[in-house]
Amino acid sequence: MPKTVARLLADSLEAHDVDQVYCVPGESYIGLTSALIERNSIRVVVCRHEGGAGYMAVADGRLRARAGVAIVSRGPGLSNAMVSLHSAYHDATPMVMLVGQVERRDFGRLALQEQNYSRLLSDVTKQVIEVNEPEQASEAIARAFHLAESGTQGPVAVILPEDIFDEETEAELNSPRPHVVAGPRAEDLDRLADMLAKAERPLVLVGGALMADAVRDKAVYAELNRFAEEWVLPVSPTHRRPQLFDATHPNFGGYMGIRVPPDLIGEMKKADLMVVLGERLTDTVSQSYSFPKAPQPQLPLVHVWPDADEVGRVWRPDLGMPCSPYEVIKALLKRGAPADAKKRQGWVAGLNAIHRRLLAKEWDPTDDGVNFAAIVCEVDKHLAPDATVTTDAGNFGSFVHRYIGFRQGQIFLSSVVGAMGSGMPMAVAAALRRPGKQVVAFLGDGGALMMGNEIATACQYGANPIMIISDNRMYGTIGMHSYVRYPERAFMEGTRLTNPDFAAWGRSFGAEGITICEESEVADGIARAFAVKTKPVVVHCLTSAIQMSAWRRYTRTETLP
């Protein structure tokens, strides 16, 4: 019995366990959304900007370790959404974006909003799949999910002409491909075990691919902890993956984020072996390609990542293992730790002592606004063991990573590549995916007005995140870079911001609005925010510009607001 392509696509999405899609309605794919709404088995979340819809799909991909789905219209719609594709591609996050296209009879005529998406998206997607024949629609969905979730995970775009949705087809539903897990070779495990046994000061980094394993299997955390304890190893979560290892664990070796503090990175550089489990390795993690040094590391490097094309692409590892990092951990646990593993206790304890000192809830007051450290430390007191925290891009995020000791039951979401605007839509996605759980979004005053409008989406669908906005009246990160690179030049005119009353702004959407102007108001303001359970909350924090990050202050302040 023939069915329309739109209904076949809906069947295909259901077969791939899709229960929620994010979109900004567009005429080029209305045939699909009307079929989804008629069926009512997949929730269609209507957003306020295609970038917001895309970021929500990115967050959904991380929350489920399955590709999140966004649907966008052709031309301007897709162009707006490209920031989320860029994030998903660089962050190795699975995502499928369905893109409307002009009718097939108009191909090549530069019809309204027509673009060549294979060319446009070639550098921000794993693949662009164009569906020009009804018989290929279900196959395209199956291929897109398989590619998005395999190897180095990432975004895949499926291009759907406007006139294809109502066509009838007898094509069969294409079932999901089984999830493929690559295991380590025995000889590679032998060599890794030998390298770990001989090392006196090894350093283990854990990153995004292991996080995906942890979403699929909660035993990952227990096995990782046992591995660290039995083999006596320091474990360091990488940039914006802090929840992978409990910050209070005695084997926590320090957070390997962007610009690691000098005393910690100085001690880390005494390592005689680096084992990278599920981290792609980037300039942020490697401290601008200095540790490990690219392309030839200054210490023995073992790189475990589930894609042979990535292992060795930038760094020359002494041992490259294109396989699941979790499979490596399980295999090493079966082998058992070396008899003299305790020789590393002093090394582990030393790194952990530095980490704990850096995590201390200490800060100096500021006279040009609240030191954001006071806000973050107060929020940390209220965070539940299963809370979700999101941050936008910006220096304010350094306070989150310095002062919040993340636990393995918590979830952290952000654009690893540092794209602004991600914090609010990711918080909305988390609140929709995990109703009743705490969701806290930390935003700067710059990013808040990029995608903060998705608070309207939160109100529309009953999601209740808490938005903590640091308002220091400037693009703080850019101000810092200007100050450091050109200390003799004024920089404020290139970074200054004029902001609204964010609490009033939040109330205009139907959220609760709270303003914190002084440090004496912090405890009460944050407690009030967490007491609200039935609507979103916006906490407008008038923060210091002198305190440029969690670690640095301006010493020349005549140009500050």
Image (spheres, grey):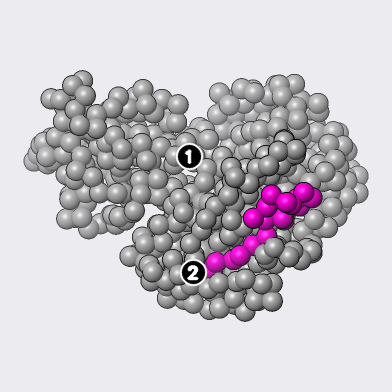
Report which residue position mark 2 lands on: 503
At horizontal 44% and vertical 39% (from top left) the residue drawn is: 83
Report which residue position mark 1 lands on: 88
Magenta range: 539-561
Mark 1 element type: helix
Describe residue 495's horizontal placement relative to residue 57 as left or right. right
Describe residue 68's horizontal placement relative to residue 482 as left or right. left
Q: Nearer the viewer, residue 380 or 16?
A: 380
Above or below for 100 versus 524: above
The prevailing secondary structure element of the residues shown in magenta is loop
Per the model, the C-alpha gap separating discs 2 and 1 is: 31 Å
Most distant residue in the left direction: 1
**Does the magenta-highlighted stretch encompass residue 215?**
no
Q: Of the residues under marks 2 and 1, which one precedes in the sequence?
A: 1
Describe residue 451's horizontal placement relative to residue 44 as left or right. right
At horizontal 72% and vertical 48% (from top left) the residue drawn is: 255
